[in-house]
Image (spheres, rainbow, N blue to C red):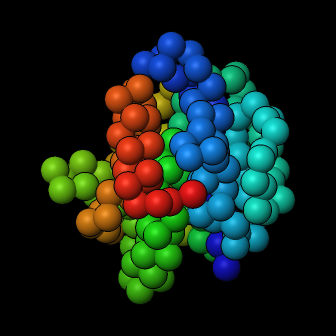
Amino acid sequence: MFDAIILAGGGAARLGGTDKAMLEITGVSLLDRVIAAVADAEQLIVVGPARPLLRASAPVTWRREHPAGGGPVAALAAALPHGDADIVVTLAADLPSIGPAVPVLLAALGGSPSDCAALVDGAGRVNYLAAAWRRESLARALAAVGEPNGAAMRSLVAGAMLIEVPDGGGWGLDCDTWDDIDRARSRMHREGTT
């Protein structure tokens, strides 16, 4: 059992302010893809403006950080009180291939005493928004940060015991630019993914 928090409120500056979460890849929005990846969550909280979902595979609770645009730490702080499962999966809304990573992250965290399990790519970059947390650990980390608005994700994980989960499948590749979107579309077209 787990809860899921999806962060979908970013400004998408590198995409000219386009609503990134609603961009489609093979006819399915990025947000719908990430929601499908955590459809088994007890509580599924999306932080960002409420939007129409084309393939909502699970009930969604919408929340906003205050003020809007306060960043990912503020978004996590706004969402965390709206669930109660011991494990919380935290994902960005721009991860179209994240589905296979969710059970891997849950298994990695479940088999250890660590606070958080996060994907790490081949270059050693940890994706803090492709992670699974123990709820108590995330609450403690948020309290240690203090004011969450504008806080960096690195400050959130600074004192956490982190498991780095190798991302051999490219599950954590995000879509921050138009080139990223084009690559994701090409990849899913090649793989026949819908």
Residue reaching furthest to the bottom? 111
Image position of 133 (left or right of 29): left
Q: Quadrant of the C terminus?
A: bottom right
Residue 80, position as x, y percentages in the image: 68, 53
Relative vertical location of residue 34 with respect to residue 13 in this rendering, above or below:
below
Relative vertical location of residue 59 with respect to residue 110 in this rendering, above or below:
above
Residue, x 43% and y 35% (percent of image)?
181
In this rendering, the count of numbered labels is 0
Q: Quadrant of the N terminus?
A: bottom right
Residue, x 38% and y 55% (percent of image)?
190
Could one spot residue 157 in this view of the protein? no
Residue, x 70% and y 67% (percent of image)?
39
Could one spot residue 173 in this view of the protein? yes
Residue reaching furthest to the left? 123
Q: Could you say which is closer to the camera, residue 78 or residue 168?
A: 168
Residue 135, position as x, y percentages in the image: 60, 65
Q: Could you say which is closer to the camera, residue 135 or residue 121?
A: 121
Residue reaching furthest to the top? 16
Residue 32, position as x, y percentages in the image: 67, 50
Residue, x 50% and y 13% (percent of image)?
16
Relative vertical location of residue 178 with respect to residue 21 in this rendering, above or below:
above
Image position of 181 (left or right of 18): left
Image position of 15 (left or right of 112): right
Kindly indicate the quadrant of the structure image that contains residue 58: bottom right
